[in-house]
Image: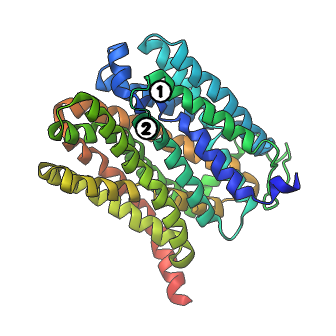
């Protein structure tokens, strides 16, 4: 037990990397899956949206029931990883059509609600002053975990889509095992049923700072998952013009998609490091503004091909997730400690509800609008900055006073 507790943060972020590989496992094999099940781009988007809806339902149950603050986070995380792995395997081995796939991916999303928010709670429980940096590392692993199936697909070359998805199940089992005996950290109050009553987490929204940060986070979420869903579409649009060979195109789409999504892990870690020097507010605002700028400029740079588009997509991938951990750290700081698990879960739940709308919209219109769907994402960062402005101004005043 003592040896396990010597490196709690390392165990938690490794578990997060493995567990969140369940999230986009079908997207990494989208082309093969589309062929096998005769799916359109809109239906592929609906599979992702179904996962998001499952996550929303799961986080709502965790938050409103008080379960996120009633039971040890490590126990919930481990259980979610194991059940999610089994359901993900069922998608690969048992599902035979779109309708069955939708149901199973919804159930996987419910399980992910026990992985991502509870991973944040575990980090907060083992850190205190370094929460922004530690959560940056955790969200970095979420990002890398989301990109990991693309890497498996690229490295595996001729691997079937079923094998790629099953790899995520194996990783999730490993993730759950890593924190099984860790236990919750010393910086959260003991779990008590009295403090974890139905609906109490919603009271966090009474705080002006929590509310402003949460609204900014929702703007960030409008962009984030829709962008991640679009990355393979954007890359295929670029690579198919440059390379006519179908097999090489598939490999390059997977490799570049992994790089563009995966670089967000570096962005999250960099954001955490900068938060210790500039503050979480400044990092979140700058990242949101930069990713919003990429939404605006991408359709203009598309005619210049791979040489210019790939650097723009990499910068977009770097900054689109950089603010996520900082919003979570600011929200955790702005709510009572005994409500952290539930408050973050409800914030995640609403944020992911926003993603369903943006994902559905961009995948539905991509066939007609092409890369111009990037502009559909722009309202998220813009409104996020507007909602976040009171927090930005307050932080600026505090800095001037100091």
Mark carried by residue 19 = none
- Residue under the point 33% across and 63% down: 290
Q: Which residue is mark 2?
A: 155
List x then y, in percent, for residue 334: 63, 63
List x then y, in percent, for residue 143: 49, 48
* Left or right position of 220 against 176: left
The answer to whether residue 44 is above or below residue 190 is above
- Which of the 4 image quadrants contains residue 87? top right
* Left or right position of 396 against 370: right
- Single out the residue that lies furthest toward the left: 303
Asked if the residue under mark 2 is in contact with the one under mark 1, i.e. CB atoms within 8 Å, the reply is no
- Which of the 4 image quadrants contains residue 63? top right
Looking at the rendering, in which quadrant would you find the C terminus?
Answer: bottom right
Helix, strand or loop under label 2: helix
The answer to whether residue 76 is above or below residue 185 is above
Q: Earlier in the sequence, mark 1 or mark 2?
A: 1
Residue 393 in sight: yes
Q: Which residue is mark 1?
A: 50
List x then y, in percent, for residue 208: 56, 62
Residue 340 in sight: no
Q: What whole-number distance in Å separates the C-alpha atoms at marks 1 and 2?
A: 27 Å
The answer to whether residue 360 is above or below residue 175 is above
The answer to whether residue 44 is above or below residue 397 is above
Structural crowding at the residue carrying mark 1, measured as other residues with C-alpha within 10 Å and reported as few (<14), some (14–19) or many (≥20): many
Helix, strand or loop under label 1: helix
Front residue of 70/309: it is 309
- Residue under the point 52% across and 42% down: 350
List x then y, in percent, for residue 133: 59, 66
Front residue of 285/257: it is 257
- Which of the 4 image quadrants contains residue 41? top left
């Amino acid at each position: 037990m003592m040896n396990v507790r010597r490196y709690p943060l390392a165990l938690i972020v490794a578990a997060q990397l493995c567990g969140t590989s369940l999230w986009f496992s079908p997207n990494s094999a989208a082309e093969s899956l589309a062929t096998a099940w005769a799916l359109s781009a809109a239906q592929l988007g609906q599979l992702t949206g179904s996962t998001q809806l499952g996550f929303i339902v799961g986080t709502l149950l965790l938050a409103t029931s008080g379960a996120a603050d009633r039971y040890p986070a490590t126990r919930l995380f481990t259980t979610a990883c194991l059940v999610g792995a089994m359901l993900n395997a069922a998608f690969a081995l048992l599902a035979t059509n779109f309708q069955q796939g939708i149901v199973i991916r919804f159930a996987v999303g419910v399980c992910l609600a026990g992985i991502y928010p509870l991973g944040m709670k575990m980090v907060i429980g083992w850190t205190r002053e370094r929460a922004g940096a530690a959560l940056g590392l955790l969200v970095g692993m979420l990002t890398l975990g989301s990109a990991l199936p693309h890497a498996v697909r690229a490295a595996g070359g001729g691997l079937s889509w079923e094998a790629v998805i099953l790899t995520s199940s194996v990783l999730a089992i490993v993730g759950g095992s890593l924190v099984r005996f860790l236990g919750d950290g010393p910086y959260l109050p003991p779990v008590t049923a009295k403090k974890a009553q139905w609906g109490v987490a919603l009271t966090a929204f009474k705080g002006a700072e929590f509310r402003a940060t949460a609204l900014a986070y929702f703007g960030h979420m409008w962009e984030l998952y829709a962008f991640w869903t679009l990355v393979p579409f954007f890359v295929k649009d670029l690579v198919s013009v440059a390379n006519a060979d179908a097999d090489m195109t598939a490999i390059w789409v997977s490799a570049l998609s992994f790089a563009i999504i995966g670089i967000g892990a570096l962005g999250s870690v960099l954001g955490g490091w900068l938060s210790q020097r500039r503050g979480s507010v400044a990092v979140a605002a700058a990242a949101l503004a930069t990713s919003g700028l990429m939404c605006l400029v991408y359709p203009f740079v598309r005619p210049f091909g791979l040489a210019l588009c790939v650097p723009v997509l990499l910068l977009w991938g770097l900054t689109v997730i950089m603010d996520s951990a900082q919003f979570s750290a600011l929200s955790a700081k702005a709510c009572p400690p005994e409500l952290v698990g539930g408050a973050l879960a409800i914030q995640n739940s609403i944020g992911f509800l926003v993603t369903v709308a943006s994902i559905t919209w961009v995948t539905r219109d991509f066939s007609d609008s092409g890369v111009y769907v990037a502009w559909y994402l722009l309202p998220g960062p813009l409104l996020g900055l507007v909602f976040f402005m009171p927090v930005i101004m307050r932080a600026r005043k505090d800095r001037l006073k100091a």
